[in-house]
Each structure stands twice: as structure tokens, then as C-alpha cells.
Image (cartoon, rainbow, N blue to C red):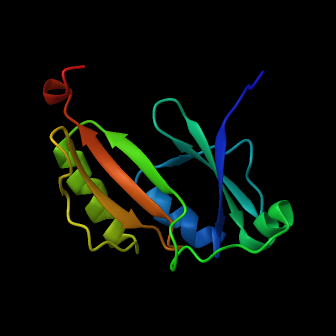
Amino acid sequence: MIQDFWINLPVKDLGRSKEFFTALGFKFNTVHGNSASSACLLVGEKNVVLMLFDEPTFNGFIQSKIQSSTRTDEVLLSIGVQSKEEVDVLAQKAIDAGGKSNHKPHNMTGFMYGCIFSDPDGHRWNVLFKDQSVMGN
């Protein structure tokens, strides 16, 4: 039986990545998963684990080539927030902290408002507000 789920991402500069995600308001598990080559990022109210590994460590796990996240997209990591204003604030924090975006916050569908940005390593993040009153559920 599956017990846990977490995401692992390679990063070029672990310290820089920790600064970036701290500036966005993310928390780190200070007890487990932290070393000179890793950091345990906790996401959301359920504390989903996103492990950041320096590239040599990550490469040791996968034993294959790490694809360039600046040239291709393999995954879009989505974060849910509670309001359109939170989308706007988080998108601006990402830019201010060194992320990149040419995707202004906007209505993405009838019930979703969001923005896509890239972290310093080029991983793409989608911050979304889902308007429950429009969704119906």
C-alpha cells in the first residue's frame, strides 16, 4: 500500500533556491531532509513534501541526464491559494525573489484565476485561485 507521496526537484544552487522559496512564504522542515545537498520544502496546509536536491545528488538518484528546465517543460507544479489577490501577491513575490514570468495573472477559465512563473532553476509553477462560487462545488 502506498504510504506517502513527495516531489523531488534538482537545483543548481541549493542556498539560492531556499532563499527564493522562503521569500515566497514557503516553510522548510528543519528536522528531516535537510543537508548540505538537500532541503525539505513543505507545501500547503497538508505539508506536501517537495525535496530540493543539488544536481549532483539528484543525478545520483536518477542515473541519467537531467533535462534543462529552461528549454523544455515536463511538469507544471500548481499551488492553490484563497483569493485573486493572493495570486497577484505570490506572482509578484516570485519576480521580486528572482523568478521569471511573462504570464500576467488573469482569468484562465470561468472559475480559475492564475499566473505561471519559473523559479531560478526554470521549474514552472502555476499559482491558482479557484472560485468555488462559480465552480458550483
Give the quarter of the image for residue 105: bottom left
Rendered residue at 24%/55% (across/down): 89
Q: Is residue 70 left or right of residue 106?
A: right
Rendered residue at 51%/80% (across/down): 71
- Relative height, residue 2 to residue 89 (above, below): above
Judging depth in this view, the residue of 37 and 107 nearest the camera is 107
Judging depth in this view, the residue of 26 and 71 nearest the camera is 71
Give the quarter of the image for residue 5: top right
Q: Is residue 129 left or right of residue 50?
A: left
Judging depth in this view, the residue of 60 and 86 nearest the camera is 60
Q: Name the quarter where the C terminus is drawn.
A: top left
Q: Is residue 93 left or right of residue 71?
A: left
Rendered residue at 60%/77% (across/down): 68
x, y (%) of residue 88? 21, 55
For the image shown, how many numbered marks are present on the structure?
A: 0
x, y (%) of residue 81? 31, 40
Q: Name the quarter where the N terminus is drawn.
A: top right
Give the quarter of the image for residue 121: bottom right
x, y (%) of residue 73? 50, 67
Rendered residue at 21%/51% (across/down): 108
x, y (%) of residue 11? 64, 69
